[in-house]
Structures are given as structure tokens and as C-alpha cells.
Image: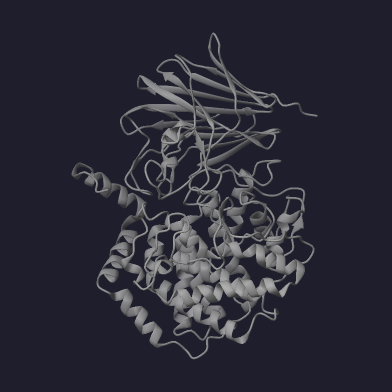
């Protein structure tokens, strides 16, 4: 949608704030290169330099023992929750849900990824990420069944035969190309001793690496301009490709360039507290898994990882560890974008379990973890790392995304300065968990591309656990992922100890001012909302359990039988809604991409001079 002319100055300021001078210059350079045919000319020259044989070295994958893997079912599972009843190998250019067929002979630069009628492009791209092959690989590791290895290789061969270099939808994105090739290299190394791994198939992997380098190398600058995990994926792939295939043309020059890009990316994207530029645990996992891939390749080839990689991994793991819900089966709050991405799903844990990543990261860095042993150790084992245990582990409490905990209570409060553009309009959002189970939750993402009203519909403030002022939004959308105006909260009180409030003030662009205070104690969470400037606002809570609402003399009481009680002190009347299909704000939650289910939501008024107080009490029986 083209923005109104009156918005263009504001869009310019937002673009400057989002990408900066260097990023805007890189984006302009990429567009000039693409429109002038420079990318096509580079790809042609690259293809002319193809060696007769591209030898690919060892990654250092270690086939683990002592873990179990179930027999894989039929079809393909994506995002940890979407099952596709399709053939294997799939029809690579056919959207599995809409039936739209993408042209397979058109250069990638002439295609679009935003046609909602055609379907969400991610459903097509994710087929090529090959993560859905990991259950077959894990089962092969347990059983030694060579038929499973043959099935895996057949999929890789079919993909290569169906996707000539730089033609079709699967070459559109440099990050998709990078992740696909990283996973292919991983699989090939894991299957190196299998009878199914023939010399021809090893040569095929070398050809896939060569073609992928030709796609990624000319657009690394554009990836850097995005200031997100596109840059870590593409620079990480390019750096490791030149180590594993040193016979590539210009390998040394490409390696230096990739190392510089990766160092720049991690310095920009990982804050000092370990939090991530995309304000999303899912996207942080993607970036960290690629960095762990770099560590493994560096170890296998005798090189040092680029500067900043180990620091980013260490700080990132400490931050994610602070968000990990105690007794929550590895869960973290579903904040920000969640596109169901998982580069190395190498355990029996569900997609929302972050213990495999945290155990792997600490093991790869030679550090100990306080996460007890379990099936989540398998990811590290595939990379030849063994977890070591300790009673205490360092955590980093973030400034923007702050965990607050006391015994049975785990709260995450999103409020503070943004070093990068927002993912969601979720300043002042609060997640509440009791005994490892969710009470008040973030709605997730559902889909980035969809027919109205579902195109990235769970990003706005109207679906978050926040106070909001109608007519004075904290952020204004200008596309699927871009905001032309946003507000950043000021931390008034840090809440450094249990029982001390963490207080944040949010000044909205239209002049309204909201203040939220959060206090956490054992069995109890108190949230106080005030409207300092303005006349009326609304406080919303997305609640994970069905509840009964009873009006009281001071407001409302909500009860989820045997779990929790919420006492609300507020003016006016509480409103309850529950999952109306054409209204994303009516009560929906998406635990992982492409999956949504209805939930109950309560909204209560907030008026000037009268705080709205929400008290969560854990009523579950505890031994």
C-alpha cells in the first residue's frame, strides 16, 4: 500500500531511524544493482568460473548415541505445528495450501513474495530449509536403516534437479539460500559413512555450495542493511563455505569479506545484555544456531571464528536463560515475531523448547549449564559437544525485555529503549506464568502474509497485554514489518529485588502518557496502570485459561478453576471476548507460525486520576 503524501516526511525519519545512513546507502546500491542487471551479470560470470569438482571438507558432525527418535510419519511438518499431507519429495514450486504454482524458470529477482492470494511464501520456502528432514536423520542415527538415508538423499537430489541456479522462488532470498545450504552440508557430513552417500552425491553438495555462494556473495551488503538475522545467516554461510570448500573462486577474498560482515552483524544485533535486535526469541535462536554452526566449522577446519561471535553467543545464551520459564518445559514467552524458524531441530523437544539451544551454546563455548540432563542434550551431541553441569549459571537481565521471578512466579516485562526498529507494538507488555504454566500471554504472530484481516495482524498494540489510548497508538504500521512512528518507554524504577516495583513511563506521539508498575512476589503479581496525561484508555489481558468473570464493588474478579484468580480494580465495565474469526483482536493466540486458536480476553477501562490495578494470585495447590 502506498503511503499518503502527508506521511512521507515521517516515513523518511522512520527509515533513517531503522536503517541509518549506511544501511540506506546499501539498500540503494542493491536496488541499483538489481535493476541494472548487475546481479544477473555477476551470477553468469560466477557460473563460468565453476571448477570441475568442488571438494567439501568435514564439518565435524558427530552421530550421537543414547538418544531415541520416533518413526517419522507421512507428509511434512513445518514450524513445529503445521502438518502438510503432501508427497515426499514435494512439488517444490507448488504452494502446498493454495495450489498456486510459481514459475520455475524465471530469474528470482522478477518474482514477488507478498501476494496473499498466492499464499504465504514461507510455506514454500520452509520446504527448502530441509529442517523437516531431521526426524529422518535422527531415526537413521538410532536404527542405522539405510533406507532412511536414501530417502534423505533423494529429497536433496530432487530439489537440485527441480531448482536450477538462480531460477524460481527458492532463490529469491539470500537467507533461505544460506540456511538451506548450511543444513545440506550438515546432513551430508552426518551421512558421510552411509552407503547411500555416493561420490556423485558428494559432488552434488559441492555444486550446491558453489551455486549458493554465487547467490549470496553479491547481496551481503543488502543483508547487512536489514540489521537482522538475514545478515548473520548469509555472512555465516559465506564464511563457512569458503572454509569447507577452499577451492571456490576467490575463496580467500570472500572469506575476509564474510568475516568482516559477520563481525559487524553480531556487534550491531546483540546488545550488551545479550538481547537481540529483532526483539524475538525465535529469531535470536536462528542467529545463534548459525553462529554455533560457524563455531563447529571453525573447530573442524582449525580456524578462529570472526571477532564478536563467541561474545554474542555467551551473552545471548545468558539473556535467553533469564527468560526461560522455571518448570516450563523449556518455554520462553512468545514475544515479538515468531515465524516457526528452527535451523537444527535435532532433539525430540517441541519447537518451543529452548533448552537444546542453551545447552548447545554453553557446551560449544566450553562452559557449564545449570539445565539438568535430558533429551535436549542431543543437539549439542550432533555437533560433537558434551554438556557439563553446574549448580549456578550466569544470566543477564535485559533492559528492554526484563524477567522478574519469585519462586512459583515468572514475569517478563517489555519496556525500555529500542536499539532497533520494533517488531511488535508491545511496549509495556507483561507475560505472567505460575508454576511453569502461562496465565497472561503474548498472542504470537500467526502469519506474515495472509488474506485480510490476518496479514501480520498480531503485531499491533491492540492484541498485547498493554494499556492503550484509542487515537494515540504507541506505533503506526507502514507495511508488514515497518513502522513509521513508534514510542519507547522510559524506565523509572528498575525493580532490582523481589517485591520492588519495576516502573516504566510511555509517552505517546499524540501527547498521552501511560505509566505501568509491575511488582512480583511469591504467588502474586501486581500490575498498576495510570494515565498521567489523557482522559481514557483501555487495559487488556490475553488469558491462557478459560475463566469466569464476576463483577465486584471495586471492579471485576476473574477465576480459572484450580489455577489462578485475577482481581481487577477499575472504572466502568469489563469486556470479555473470545476468538471471532474475522477479528484478530477478539482473542487469538499463535503458539507457533501458521497455527492459531481462540483464547479469552478481558479489557477494562483506565481513566485519568484513577489507576487500574490487576492482581494475579496463584491459587493452585502446591506441596
- The correct choice, above or below, for 38 with respect to 613 in the image is below
Q: Nearer the viewer, residue 450 or 224?
A: 450
* Residue 480 shown left or right of residue 35 in the figure: right
Residue 264 visible in the shown view: no
* Residue 417 shown left or right of residue 129 in the figure: left
Residue 171 visible in the shown view: yes
- The correct choice, above or below, for 177 with respect to 479 in the image is below
Direction bottom: furthest residue: 52
Measured as percent of width and height from the top left, residue 454 is found at 41, 43
* Residue 339 shown left or right of residue 460 in the figure: right
State the image quarter where residue 151 is shown: bottom right
Measured as percent of width and height from the top left, residue 297 is found at 60, 73
Display coloring:
one colour
Q: How many marks?
A: 0
Direction top: furthest residue: 553
Q: Which residue is painted at 43% across and 48% down in the image? A: 419
Q: Nearer the viewer, residue 608 or 128?
A: 128
Q: Nearer the viewer, residue 211 or 417?
A: 211
Measured as percent of width and height from the top left, residue 528 is found at 52, 23
The quadrant of the picture occupied by the C terminus is top right
Measured as percent of width and height from the top left, residue 617 is found at 65, 24
Q: Which residue is painted at 44% across and 30% down in the image? A: 505
Direction left: furthest residue: 5
* Residue 550 shown left or right of residue 104 in the figure: right
Q: Which residue is painted at 68% across and 71% down in the image? A: 148
Q: Nearer the viewer, residue 87 or 18?
A: 87
Amino acid at each position: 500500500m502506498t503511503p499518503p503524501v502527508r506521511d512521507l516526511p515521517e516515513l523518511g525519519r522512520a527509515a533513517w531511524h531503522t536503517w541509518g545512513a549506511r544501511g540506506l546507502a546499501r539498500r540503494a546500491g542493491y536496488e541499483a544493482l538489481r535493476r541494472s542487471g548487475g546481479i544477473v551479470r555477476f551470477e553468469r560470470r560466477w557460473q563460468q568460473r565453476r571448477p570441475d569438482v568442488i571438494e567439501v571438507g568435514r564439518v565435524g558432525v558427530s552421530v550421537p548415541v543414547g538418544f531415541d527418535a520416533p518413526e517419522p510419519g507421512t507428509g511434512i511438518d513445518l514450524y513445529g505445528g503445521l502438518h502438510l499431507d503432501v508427497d515426499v519429495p514435494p512439488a517444490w514450486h507448488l504452494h502446498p495450501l493454495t495450489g498456486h504454482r510459481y514459475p520455475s524458470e524465471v530469474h528470482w529477482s522478477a518474482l514477488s513474495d507478498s501476494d496473499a492470494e498466492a499464499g504465504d511464501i514461507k510455506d514454500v520456502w520452509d520446504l527448502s530449509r530441509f529442517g523437516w528432514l531431521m526426524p529422518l536423520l535422527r531415526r537413521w542415527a538410532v536404527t542405522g536403516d539405510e533406507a532412511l538415508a536414501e530417502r534423505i538423499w533423494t529429497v536433496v537430489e530432487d530439489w537440485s534437479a527441480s531448482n536450477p541456479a538462480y531460477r524460481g522462488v527458492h532463490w529469491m532470498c539470500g537467507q533461505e539460500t544460506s540456511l538451506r545450504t548450511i543444513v545440506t552440508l550438515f546432513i551430508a557430513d552426518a551421512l558421510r559413512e552411509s552407503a547411500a552417500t555416493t561420490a556423485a552425491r558428494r559432488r552434488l553438495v559441492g555444486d550446491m555450495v558453489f551455486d549458493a555462494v554465487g547467490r549470496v556473495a553479491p547481496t551481503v551488503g543488502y543483508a547487512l542493511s536489514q540489521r537482522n538475522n538475514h545478515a548473520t545467516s548469509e555472512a555465516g554461510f559465506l564464511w563457512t563455505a569458503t572454509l569447507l570448500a577452499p577451492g571456490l573462486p576467490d575463496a580467500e577474498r570472500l572469506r575476509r569479506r564474510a568475516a568482516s560482515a559477520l563481525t559487524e552483524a553480531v556487534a550491531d544485533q546483540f546488545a550488551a545484555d545479550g538481547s537481540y535486535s529483532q526483539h524475538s526469541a525465535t529469531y535470536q535462536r536462528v542467529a545463534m544456531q548459525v553462529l554455533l554452526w560457524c563455531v563447529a566449522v571453525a573447530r573442524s577446519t582449525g580456524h578462529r571464528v570472526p571477532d564478536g561471535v563467541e561474545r554474542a553467543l555467551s551473552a545471548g545464551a545468558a539473556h535467553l536463560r533469564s527468560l526461560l520459564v522455571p518448570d516450563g518445559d523449556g518455554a520462553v514467552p512468545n514475544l515479538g515475531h515468531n515465524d516457526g524458524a528452527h535451523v537444527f531441530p535435532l532433539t525430540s523437544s517441541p519447537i518451543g523448547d529452548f533448552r537444546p539451544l542453551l545447552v548447545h551454546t554453553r557446551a560449544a563455548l566450553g562452559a557449564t549449564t545449570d539445565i539438568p540432563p535430558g533429551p535436549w542434550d542431543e543437539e549439542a551431541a550432533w555437533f560433537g559437544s558434551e554438556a557439563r553441569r553446574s549448580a549456578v549459571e550466569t544470566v543477564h537481565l535485559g533492559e528492554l525485555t526484563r524477567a522478574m521471578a519469585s519462586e512459583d512466579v515468572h514475569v517478563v516485562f517489555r519496556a525500555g529503549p529500542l536499539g532497533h526498529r520494533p517488531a511488535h507494538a508491545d511496549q509495556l507488555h507483561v507475560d505472567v506464568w505460575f508454576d511453569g504454566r502461562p496465565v497472561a500471554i503474548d498472542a504470537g504472530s500467526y502469519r506474515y502474509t495472509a488474506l485480510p484481516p490476518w496479514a501480520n495482524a498480531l503485531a499491533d498494540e491492540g492484541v498485547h497485554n498493554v494499556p492503550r489510548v484509542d487515537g494515540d497508538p504507541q506505533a503506526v504500521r507502514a507495511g508488514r514489518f515497518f513502522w513509521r512512528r513508534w514510542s519507547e518507554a522510559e524506565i523509572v524504577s528498575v525493580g532490582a529485588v523481589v517485591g520492588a516495583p519495576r516502573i516504566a513511563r510511555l509517552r505517546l506521539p499524540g501527547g498521552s502518557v501511560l505509566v505501568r508498575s509491575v511488582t512480583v512476589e511469591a504467588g502474586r503479581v501486581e500490575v498498576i496502570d495510570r494515565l498521567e496525561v489523557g482522559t481514557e484508555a483501555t487495559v487488556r489481558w490475553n488469558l491462557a485459561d478459560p475463566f469466569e468473570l464476576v463483577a465486584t464493588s471495586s471492579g471485576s474478579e476473574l477465576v480459572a478453576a484450580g489455577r489462578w484468580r485475577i482481581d481487577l480494580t477499575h472504572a466502568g465495565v469489563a469486556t470479555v471476548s473470545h476468538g471471532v474469526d474475522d477479528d484478530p483482536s477478539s482473542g487469538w493466540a499463535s503458539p507457533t507460525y501458521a497455527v492459531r486458536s481462540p483464547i479469552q480476553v478481558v479489557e477494562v477501562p483506565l481513566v485519568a486520576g484513577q489507576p487500574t490495578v490487576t492482581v494475579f494470585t496463584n491459587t493452585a495447590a502446591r506441596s
